[in-house]
Amino acid sequence: MKNIEPFMHDTFYHVYNRTNNKEALFKDEDNFPYFIHLYRRYLEPFVHTYSYALLTNHFHFSISVKSVEEISEVLSKIKVAYCTVPMSKYRFKENKGEFIHDLISGQFRRFFISYAKSINKHYNRKGSLFQKRFKNPILNTAEKFTWNQYYIHHNARKHGLVDNFLDYPHTSYSHILLDSESFLARDYLFNWFGNKISYENFHLQTLEF
């Protein structure tokens, strides 16, 4: 995973990637929840997730890497099988920056490989599925983070898949508005926008890309 932004604790990112040759990323409806299932297995212990969109041949996630204290606590409990970085307490203590970058980028790599292997096995497919280098630009201003939520939830409209973003089912928007338990950082988002109504009103605008 070369040429990506360094993953740092307490930092916000827009992570996205697409398939090779615009191949379908999701072959049938069951693939969508399975993709999120694998994402949660490999990334949820180490990142906060604010939004996502799963499109025909690519995906988007808005995330932040958890704090050093949170990651340290997770590493003391997590099963090694779900983590690509050796559980070296010395390395984490002496060089947290390098360790955290290798940890998060490695977990994304493992997530991609796991999903691709499942698709290959189920659909009698061979070869790589994703482009080799995913993108992870840093959301280093309030404006970038705010716009990123809109951009991700309206991405299907941007690509002409729907006229109204509410008609596209494979984003985090409807899940954020539900009262049920969620892995998404709902409280943070509502506080960021002021409240739930302000969050909704922001998304219900028709803004140009």
Image: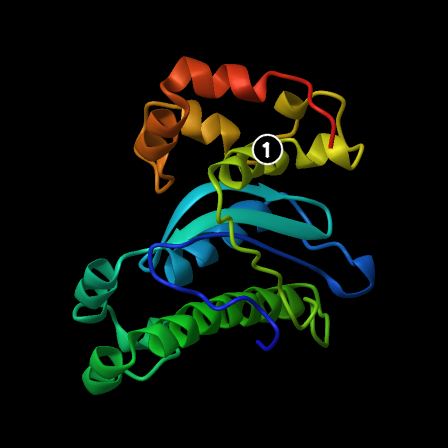
Q: Quadrant of the N terminus?
A: bottom right
Q: Is residue 23 rendered to the left or right of residue 134? A: right
Report the residue at 51% width, 33% height from top. Answer: 146
Mark 1 Cα within 10 Å, few/some/many (few <14, many 20+)?
A: many
The answer to whether any part of residue 119 appears in the image is yes
The answer to whether any part of residue 26 appears in the image is no
Residue at the spot of label 1: 153
Report the residue at 53% width, 48% height from top. Answer: 61
Callout count:
1
Vertically, is 52 above or below 180?
Answer: below
Q: Is residue 69 rendered to the left or right of residue 116? A: left
Kindly identify the amino acid type of the residue bearing the numbered disc 1: His
Report the residue at 20% width, 79% height from top. Answer: 93
Report the residue at 72% width, 75% height from top. Answer: 126
Vertically, is 41 above or below 183?
Answer: below
The residue lying toward the viewer, choosing from 162 and 138, is 138
Residue 25 location, x and y as percent?
69, 55
Q: Is residue 15 rendered to the left or right of residue 158? A: left
Q: Which image quarter: residue 120?
A: bottom right
Tag 1, which secondary structure? helix
Residue 44 location, x and y as percent?
36, 55
